[in-house]
Image: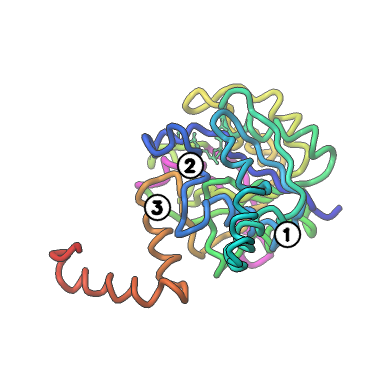
Amino acid sequence: MSVTKAVIPAAGLGTRFLPATKATPKEMLPVVDKPAIQYVVEEAVAAGLDDLLFITGKSKRSLEDHFDRNAELEGALAAKGDSDRLSLVQFPTSLGHIHYVRQGEPLGLGHAVLQAEHHVGDEPFAVLLGDDLIDESNPILPRMLEVQRELGGSVICLMGVPPADISLYGCAAVKASDMPGILGISDLVEKPSADEAPSNFAIIGRYVLSPDVFSVLRETKPGKGGEIQLTDALRVLAQRGEVHGVVFDGLRYDTGDRLSYLKAVVSIAARRDDLGPPLRAWLEALVAGGFADLA
Ligand code: UTP
């Protein structure tokens, strides 16, 4: 069965980015001139997923407004004859069929995904974390969808990280497979210490999941941080031999983390035709001057 639905969890509290995220969802923070979540939605649509379900929560109103029409703004831009900006404003409303479900309380990513059960039904589906940007120069979702089609089960995305960083992620115990770039997953651990980690493969925010995950999630108790963890549910499926890993070696940013967010902004802007040349010249001068001239 081919995958058409993408679930985009965006109901977290975003505490690492306070106070910016007190009243604004972190998924709405601008990366250059688009909110982070628009990149994620564009990635899903580019991979052929046009049924998009956002998991939202408190303070997520601006997110819903962004993907809706804004008659007043559109009217003002049309009256000025500013067709370029008018199409920028209208574009997010044309990105697939958008649905919302609210997660009453942010009880964890696993709990957020469980809110999608009714909408998804009995078919495989993708999950794209709303604060995780995969640079469009190296998309990974099409490969993950292909692997799910060929092997069935669930597919997670793995990235090698330095041992000191593994405690920030879910971590996979892996075994070799016959397919290049694909690993069998025998176990998963959420945020292990460097000593306990079974590998240096971190799970990053793209998944293609079997609907079997829902019945496991319903039984999953709060784990690390007191949250219902998606990793803990996937662990049950991994121990049954039903999870495959795709290794990602492109660029990825966690826009919920301040440093990674800054890297996303600079690296995306530096490669754009409009902003890139002056920004790169300014960055080069800044570095050459040992950061003395911050003007
Ligand atoms: P994070 O763990 O990065 O989100 O979840 P967080 O809890 O908001 O982050 P901090 O640590 O407080 O800064 C990854 C993704 O899962 C969503 C988040 O919105 C983010 O897109 N999420 C997390 C939910 O939708 N619900 C939750 O209960 C937790």
Query: What residue is disc 3 on?
Result: 260
Which callout, 3 or 2, points to the residue nearer the camera? Answer: 2
Mark 1, Cα crowd under 10 Å, few <14 / some 14-19 / many 20+, is many
| Res 129 label | none
The answer to whether residue 258 is left or right of residue 108 is left
Q: Quadrant of residue 59?
A: top right
Query: What residue is disc 1 on?
Result: 147
CB under 8 Å between discs 2 and 1: no
Whether 52 is drawn above or below 227: the answer is below
Q: Percent position (x, y) of residue 268?
A: 45, 65
First reached walking from the N terminus: tag 2 or tag 1: 2
Q: Amino acid at mark 1?
A: Val
Q: Element under label 2? A: helix
Q: Amino acid at mark 3?
A: Ser
Whether 27 is drawn above or below 111: the answer is below
The magenta region covers: 164-189
80 vs 288, nearest the viewer: 80
How far apart in space, not on screen, are marks 3 and 2 (Cα)? Answer: 13 Å
Query: What residue is disc 2 on?
Result: 26
Magenta region includes residue 284: no
First reached walking from the N terminus: tag 3 or tag 1: 1
Residue appearing at x 35%, y 51% in the figure? 259
Magenta region includes residue 185: yes
Residue appearing at x 18%, y 74% in the figure? 288
Q: Is mark 2 within 8 Å of ligand 1?
A: yes
43 vs 148, nearest the viewer: 43
Q: Element under label 3? A: helix
Residue appearing at x 36%, y 35% in the figure? 19
Q: Percent position (x, y) of residue 67?
A: 65, 48
Mark 3, Cα crowd under 10 Å, few <14 / some 14-19 / many 20+, is some
The answer to whether residue 70 is left or right of residue 19 is right
Q: Percent position (x, y) of residue 79?
A: 62, 61
